[in-house]
Amino acid sequence: MEHTRSTYQRLPVELWIHVVGHISEKRDVAKLCLVSTLLNSISLPFLYQNLNISMQNGREWDRQLSLFRTLQIPRYSNIVTTLEITLSGGYVCAKILDRDKSCTCEVYDREVGNFLSALRNLRSLYFRCRLCRANGRHSYLDTLQTRQLRVFRFSCSCLTSQIGESNEPNPTSLLNAPFMQAVTSMALACSNRWLIDDTGTISSVLRNPDVLPSLNTLGYIVSSDSGIFRFPNEFLAARPIQRLYYPGPPLLSYETPPTQQTLECLMTNDVMQWLSPIVTKYPDLYANLRCLGTITLLSSKEENILHALEPLSVLKLLHTIELNQFISGNTKNTGDIWSWENKFEPFEPSDSLVQRLGQQNDSLRRIYHVHRPYWDVQRTDATLWERNHDDMWTRRAIPFMDHWEVVNGALDSL
């Protein structure tokens, strides 16, 4: 026993950090916090630095409430740098569980705000709201204490217009919140009422150079009061956006003055449905593109594919393209968003096709082969084709990545 204790005491802190870092289950890390003062100080960052908070059933409410209150204590709140949180109204709202009762989502939202306001060192926040729709929610976002946030993802339908409702904007634009000052990467899936000011426009907010001065990466699924999704021309005109995810085509963008020259990475659901006429008419418009997707082909014949992708040859910096794992002749335009009917055939590029694509575009170095849209057939596999210095292409299996991961450079790190 004495020997074990002395060995434990002699182990360097660096080795303990290495050991604890290989423990995958947070419940096991939590147990280590109870062993000794030393292991407590080593384990706490692994326990709280990266948090994913969601509710799987209504019985978790008390446990989650206890966690919220723990995270208001500076010793713990100062550790948190990455947070992904889903506010699940289905498990906390009394009205959903019993129609005769009043909605209790506001109580839950208030508890969330109390602990979020304590996270001073937060660098990445993914905020997903699934509460009952109501005005006035999440007002605490305007007063978050962190000034180090770099990545912000926001998904909320609280201000989405419904028949018979007033369409008043949020009292202040979320873009004006102080915590947004250092944000470089932002994804929005919400009503534009979160973003506009009293003039009713986003562009007037962005005229202030202090609003999102460092923003360069954008994911944009923002609806107007009429339910239409618009291309983020205001952001592209006002900020040097380099990486963009937008699900549908920028309708009419080739009929207006070009504003997209800064884009280096562009991800949409079916990019070739609209990009070809744009690069044909404005060859310099997307000249800086290095990464492009998703390309959904209409034919599996090599000659047809080469012809369809020939317009991309004017993009002299294009390094990576994303090809869909299916061929579809059933794409259709539904307003601003392109959608697919459930008819498709699997597509696997041949060695010959990949080689010829490389010859057609000298700068091409990578082809990411993945299934889009991923909600109809769940796929966890993907293939990455890479071109070596001898102009030979090799392929390897890699994990599935969603559009937002690709836009944020996940492919670049492989």
Image (tube, helix red, strand yellow):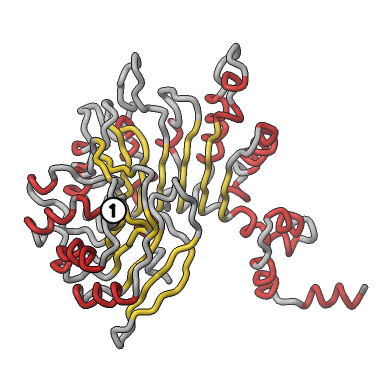
264 relative position to 188: left or right:
left
In this rendering, the answer to whether 371 lies above or below 165 is: below
Residue 79: give x, y in percent of width and height: 57, 54
Quarter location, residue 385: bottom left
Residue 163: give x, y in percent of width and height: 34, 17
Residue 214 versus residue 187: which sits nearer the camera?
Answer: 187
Q: Residue sitting at 85 percent across and 76 percent down?
A: 6
Q: Residue sitting at 56 percent across and 54 percent down?
A: 50
Kindly state the secondary structure of the residue where label 1 is placed.
Answer: strand
Residue 185: give x, y in percent of width and height: 35, 53
Quarter location, residue 105: top right
In this rendering, the answer to whether 184 lies above or below 177 is: below
342 relative position to 205: left or right:
right
Q: Can you say which quadrant of the picture contains the C terminus?
A: bottom left
Residue 263 versus residue 120: which sits nearer the camera?
Answer: 263
Quarter location, residue 306: bottom left
Q: Residue sitting at 66 percent across and 69 percent down?
A: 17
Q: How crowded is mark 1: few (under 14 residues within 10 Å), some or many (20 or more)?
A: many
Instruction: Specify the farthest residue to the top.
Output: 100
* Residue 243 can be seen, yes or no: no
Q: Can you say which quadrant of the picture contains the N terminus?
A: bottom right
* Residue 57 can be seen, yes or no: yes
Kind of residue at badge 1: Leu
Q: Residue sitting at 17 percent across and 71 percent down?
A: 316
What residue would you read off at disc 1? 244
Residue 178: give x, y in percent of width and height: 36, 42
Residue 314 versus residue 233: which sits nearer the camera?
Answer: 314
